[in-house]
Image (cartoon, rainbow, N blue to C red):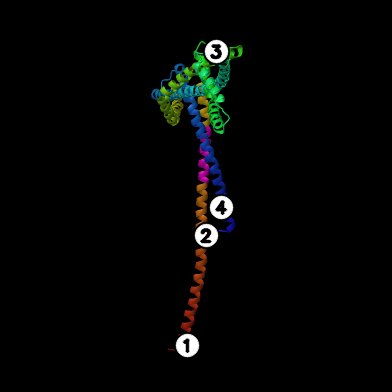
Amino acid sequence: MSTEAEADTLLAMQAIDELMAQIEEKEESIRESIRDAELQLGMEAVRVREALGLRVGGKLLEAALDASAAVASAAEAAENGRALLDERRRLEDELEHLMREASSEDGEKRRLSIRLGAMIYEQCSFSLLDRDVFRIVYDDVEEDRRLEERDDGSFISRLVGSGKARMRRMGEEGRFISYAAIALKSDARLDGENAAALLSSLKALEEKRRTQGEEIAALQGKLAEGREKARMEERSLESSAAHIGALRRSEEEALVSYGSYLYDKGSEWIGEDTPSSILDAIEALLKLHDSYDEVQHEKDRLGREAKADDYRAMIESEEGKIMVLEKEKERIDREIAQIRREIDSLKMRIRRLDV
């Protein structure tokens, strides 16, 4: 066989292989479309089952309904779990907001308490407030005055006095806050509108913080009570996605099986009252099966051509072997003829010797 013929045969085989690959790809695509159409038929038949009144595929219908119910139940459980966790996150956000708000209110309360305490100290220094109620403030005022009067000019006296004064100034804010706390707990009147207004603001703020504290405590209690249940729901949700996915695949397989069975048994149940949506689904499947049959015929034809090309290649290979053997035979025949000539020459020499 010539090199040119071998090349032509090889190109033909490659072309068939490429066509076969395209056909197989198309075949797979149509199979997937058929499966989708069977799924759609199964779903539609389930949806209109009451109106359809099918007399076939009862067990397959029951299996599809059971699979759908299992999916719905698992999905509902997962949704309930997500709702519970969403509510918990909402409560956590609300608690965080209240905590930030309370912290801000505490800062404001401290600032106002220091201002009010400073006013109370000043008013007590002028003996304007009730001595029984604000006895601690009056004691501090007296102590501060004694420290100022104790300075006799000596270095030690100044050193001790200034040291105690610095220490009292360091605790000044704490003392002012304690003075404001006395005013909040008592019904004693303060001197001046500014002090009264400041005390009123502090009382309103303290009431607000009390309400906030109750709300925070209630939220913390609710979150603590549901903590274990939330953990269980989180673990459940982690596995539910895979579980629901498996159930949905089972549901899909059940619907595909049901749709496929209905298509195969169409002659037994399709009638004048069959809903148009079902007829449309059947028609779509008929077209797909026709396309699939065409692809199968083309695939068979290409298969036969490929087999014929294989046989042709085998024939060409065998013919090539024959050509090699024939050439070898010619060489052997030439060698045999040469040997025969040598033998005839030797025989002639024998006759010349006249032995």
* Residue 30 visible in the snapshot: yes
Between 83 and 282, which is closer to the camera in this rendering? Answer: 83
First in sequence: mark 4 vs mark 2: 4
Mark 4 Cα within 10 Å, few/some/many (few <14, many 20+)?
Answer: some
Q: What residue is disc 2 on?
A: 320
Mark 1 Cα within 10 Å, few/some/many (few <14, many 20+)?
Answer: few
Instruction: Identify the image quadrant of the C terminus.
Output: bottom left
| Residue 120 picture quarter | top right
Residue at screen point 47% across, 83% down:
346
Q: Nearer the viewer, mark 2 or mark 1?
A: 2
Badge 2 element: helix
Question: How far, Cα to Cα, is label 1 from label 3?
Answer: 172 Å
The residue type indicated by label 2 comes to: Gly
Q: What residue is disc 3 on?
A: 129
Indicate the position of residue 322 as horizontal and vertical percent values.
Answer: 50, 61
What residue range appears in magenta?
289-305
